[in-house]
Image (cartoon, rainbow, N blue to C red):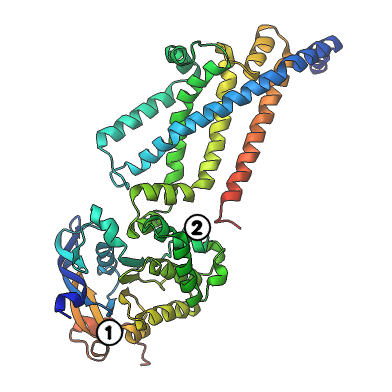
Amino acid sequence: MADEDRIMLEIAGLKKKFGEDVILDGVDLTINKGEVVVMLGSSGCGKSTLLRCINGLESFDEGSIRIDGEEIVSGSKAMTHLSQKIGMVFQSYDLFPHRNILDNITLAPVKVQRRAKEDARAQAEQLLRRVGLWEKRKAYPRELSGGQKQRVAIVRALCMNPEIMLFDEVTAALDPEMVREVLDVMLELAQGGMTMLIVTHEMGFARAVADRIVFLDEGKILENLPAETFFNNPSTQRAKDFLQTFEFKKH
Amino acid sequence: MALTEFFHELLAPDKVDEAWLIIQNQFPTAIWETLYVTVLSTLFAILIGLPLGVLLVTGEKKGILPLPAWLMQTLNVIINLLRSVPFLILMIMVFPLTRAIVGTVVGTEATVVPLVIAAFPFVARLTESSLREVNPNLIEMAQSMGASPLQIITKVMIPESVPSLLSNATIAITTVLGYSAMSGILGGGGLGKIAINYGYYRYKDLIMIAAVILLIVLVQLFQSVGTRLAVHSDKRLK
């Protein structure tokens, strides 16, 4: 395979300002097909903004983002087609409260991708069974726990057959017991070869799932290392300090 | 005592008999006219007001389908203008339009025109406020899945605000009912006309009271059906 064919996501010189505040200050990042990248960094470092730029929800000032060779331009006509290649899961699940689980999942495949209803339902069934929620297909979101809602949100994104999945702190609002069930689904997905860019604060999970860790600070990528290297031997002081905040030692 | 005297006079046997006769003869048609005018006008008002309300939300600068600022301003000014004219004055002002559409300015059908003109800007504002309640995250979610603006409107914004839209439709229909009764003074039909003709012009208080009670019953009816539908459609509640 030629090099370009292996690249799923390519970000070059990305800059984004909100008024005077520089949120992203020249971000370069390449993710290959099948690679799982975890993005770490303290809140406000620009992680979420970066994800929002990638799936076209946010415009940016300079630089470029390419998915599978196609350039992302927020609000453009081509974006409709391009955003179907990008599955996104947010912290707040964002299931449609007035649609049952099955309708939540099949809405976009049927209406946006114009797939046959039976086809979308069959895939939804297969995916829901995989995450153990097929019995809940007729339920409404309010009847589900946070962990279940988040698993449905992941299934909903997967049902669009995306080429890359973005996860924005998907377990941040969950009880500890529920975190596990969501992370297990993501781990399985990663092992299945899905290209993933994950923002999380679950260090143990990051270590287990990531091929590579990207450490973002003040809108810049400070570290871009294989997971083990990053956790054992980060190259910058800032990253060391960051990792330290997750450790508890008895003095 | 003055009060007992009042009731004694009000409920004098001959008056009650006379009132009962008029009620039997006139009320069935009047109730029908009131319902007909109210429902028809509300339907037309929703037909115009709902899309307009959608535009008020989606056409904003940060909306999903931004329209030119001058167009949005014009829309807002027109809606505000129509909303600020008292109904009876509006009715007189649209007489030429009513005559052009219906051919006359009196009678049941003729009132539909001013009622629709008065109600659609109201419906537009109510729709606007309903749609603004939709969680913006859901709209972003739909955008991130590649949905077009039209799909976001018809598949997310409207379905997600159905309970609120139903509550607001109830407010609209009861308001139109009130206006339709008011129209009785300028040639409109229905219960309002009876209350004014008999109660105000001919001092037949009993007829007026009966007409008013029926109007109250109708409002209660619309309100309880509307509330029930709104609650039933709300999947966020138990």
| Image quarter in which the C terminus of chain A is found | bottom left
Mark 1 belongs to which subunit?
A
Q: Amino acid at mark 2?
A: Pro
Q: Residue at x 44, y 64 (%)?
A: A120
Label 2: which residue?
Answer: A97
Say which residue appears at 53% left-offset and 33% top-offset.
B172
Side of B191 where A158 appears, left or right: left
On residue A211, the disc is 1
Under circle 1, the secondary element is: loop
In this picture, is B40 found above or below B155?
above
| Quadrant location of the N terminus of chain A in the rendered image | bottom left
| Residue A215 picture location, percent across and down | 23, 78
B44 to A186, vertically: above or below:
above
Lower sequence index among marks 1 and 2:
2
> Disc 1 marks which amino acid?
Asp
Q: Identify which residue, A42 or B63, lies in the foreground.
A: B63
Write the residue at 60% across / 20% down. B181
